[in-house]
Amino acid sequence: MRVLAFGTYDVKAHPRVQVLIDGLREHGLPVSEIVEPLGLSTAQRVSFLQNPASLPRFVGRLLRRWSVLALRAVRLRGAQRPTHVLVGYLGHFDVLLARLLFPRAQIVLDHLIFAAGTARDRGAGDGLRTRLLGLLDSLALGAADVIVVDTPEHRELVPARRRDSTVVVPVGATSSWFEAPGAPEREGVNPLSVVFFGLFTPLQGTRVVGEALRILHDRGVHVRATLVGAGQDSDAVHAQVDGLPSVTWQGWVDGAELPALVASHDVCLGIFGTTAKALNVVPNKVYQGAAAGCVVVTSDTEPQRRALGDDAVLVPPGDAEALANALAALAGDPATLADVRRAGARRARERFTARAVTEPLVEVLTR
């Protein structure tokens, strides 16, 4: 059994792929890689696909990467040819190339997002472009032998005829998050430290975060907050928090430095959006924050409740008042903060490691 991780994925931008690779290797499966990163974020890819004028540039970039991938793939001979090809996250196009280059291999697609659903979540309607993205989803799923999703809710979005070929593998966290040095135990009146990192999309509900921080400030509750990143809703959040002395905003932090930054805080914020997609996901920051030893505060949705149980603080989606109350309660109760922190870290070590989350995939591949 020889597994090849293949495509234009970028583990620095999307560490999910690295979790799958590491997990398979820790289960004893040999995994090699042929990868040529496309160098585009999820937002940039969706923007390219939504804007016809920019589509030729996207296609040109993709074809240049594909030419290198194909050249490297055809050099594999005999015992070097893979029996299984893992197409990494955002592989809607790459899976089509993999199907052509490796017709005898079992193609495994990590279909973490649906292109049409992501476009809708970011404000696109149900017009022609969204329907074309839906067609892209269908083509990608049709080219795969095994489809990997992250939640049972996303499995239900796969066409019924392909659900038997679909396996749920939680996002998990890479080892760097478990190894990051954690925040020291709080003492006395030390302010609660809170971190949020992300692309400031409607799914993440960052306007709720901004409003909650404003509420805490107006109440006189001192919480030190670090916001990392930028995106669709960042201007609105700036309008809510600019001028608050307790809020620090950073541009995007390099992936190698992010675990230590997050681990230096007491609380890692998850997502608080109310979109359909927000109710169906467990974001990577939830797994990563728990692995880094933070208390995770996120929205009370079925997937997140299932993943976190009682080892996190859950608040209603879209409810800034509830988020502010939860943070104020943690700020005033260091003992509870420490208890939840330890419980979340223990759950992460037991369930969120690469080895743990990939067990269902290994079972499928080794049948």
Image: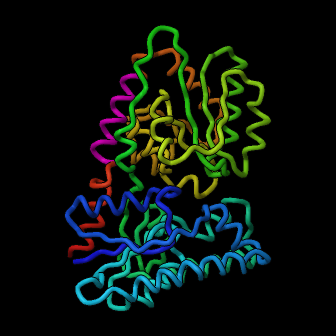
Q: How is the image coloured?
A: rainbow
Q: Where residue 13 sits in the image (x, y, percent)?
A: 53, 56
Q: Is residue 127 left or right of residue 353?
A: right
Q: Is residue 146 above or below residue 125?
A: below
Residue 364: image quadrant is bottom left
The relative height of residue 186 versus residue 38 in the rendered view (above or below) is: above
- In this view, 89 is above or below 214: below
**Horizontal side of residue 194 vs 175, given as left or right:** right
- Residue 81 position within the rendered picture, expressed as x and y whole percent measured from the top left: 29, 85
Q: Is residue 141 visible?
A: no
Name the residue rendered at 37%, 57% in the picture: 19
Q: Is residue 73 magenta?
A: no
Q: Where, quadrant-wise, is the C terminus in this rendering?
A: bottom left
**Does 351 lie within the magenta span?**
yes
The residue stretch that appears in magenta? 338-352
> Percent x, y for residue 199?
63, 50
Q: Residue 80 appears in which quarter of the rendering?
A: bottom left
Q: Nearer the viewer, residue 317 or 84?
A: 84
Quadrant for the N terminus in the image? bottom left
The residue under the point 53% across, 84% down is: 67
Question: Horizontal and vertical percent for residue 46?
Answer: 66, 67
